[in-house]
């Protein structure tokens, strides 16, 4: 799960939404403190240590970003395409893929 902090998930969400996303995904209930990026990294580390199936939780965290249909050719759409490309490369580097 070392690739996840580079995917930009924490950059897109507010702190409360980030907490909700991790809890929805099945992460332990006690949310770490700190900046959004520090919180996301701490939570991913905790999931990796404490949860029997951390990749399932990672999949729930990234599912909306991996499957998002991107329409248009403006700066925002191109930025999202770049994020999806980074996500796919990170998954490939870890010998993982979307199903």
Image (spheres, rainbow, N blue to C red):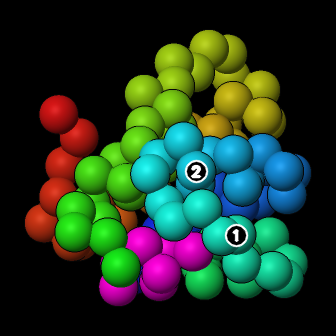
Q: Nearer the viewer, residue 21 or 71?
A: 21
Res 92 quadrant in image: bottom left
Residue under numbered circle 2: 23
Residue 56: % across, % down: 28, 52
Residue lying furthest front:
29
Judging depth in this view, the residue of 32 and 74 nearest the camera is 32
Chief SS of the magenta region: helix
State the extent of the magenta-drawn residues as a range: 43-49
Give the quarter of the image for residue 39.
bottom right
Q: In the shown orientation, is residue 69 left or right of residue 12? A: left
Q: CA distance from mark 2 to mark 1?
A: 9 Å
Residue at the image point whose x is 72% and y is 53% from the top: 18
Residue at (37%, 54%) from the top-left corner? Answer: 57
- Is residue 52 found left or right of 14 in the rendered image? left
| Label 2 or label 1, whichever comes before in sequence order | 2
Tell me the quadrant of the picture where the N terminus can be found. bottom left
Labelled pair 2, 1 in contact (Cβ < 8 Å): yes
Q: Which mark is residue 71?
A: none
- Determine which residue is flagged by label 1: 31
Residue drawn at the location 67% of the way across and 16% of the way down: 72
């Amino acid at each position: 799960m070392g690739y996840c902090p580079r995917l930009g998930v924490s950059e897109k969400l507010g702190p409360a939404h980030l907490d909700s996303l991790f809890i929805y995904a099945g992460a332990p209930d006690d949310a770490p403190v700190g900046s959004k990026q520090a919180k996301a990294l701490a939570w991913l580390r905790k999931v990796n240590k404490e949860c029997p199936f951390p990749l399932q939780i990672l999949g729930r965290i990234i599912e909306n970003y991996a499957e998002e249909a991107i329409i248009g050719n403006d700066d925002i759409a191109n930025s999202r395409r770049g994020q999806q490309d980074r996500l796919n490369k990170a998954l490939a580097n870890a010998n993982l893929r979307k199903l």
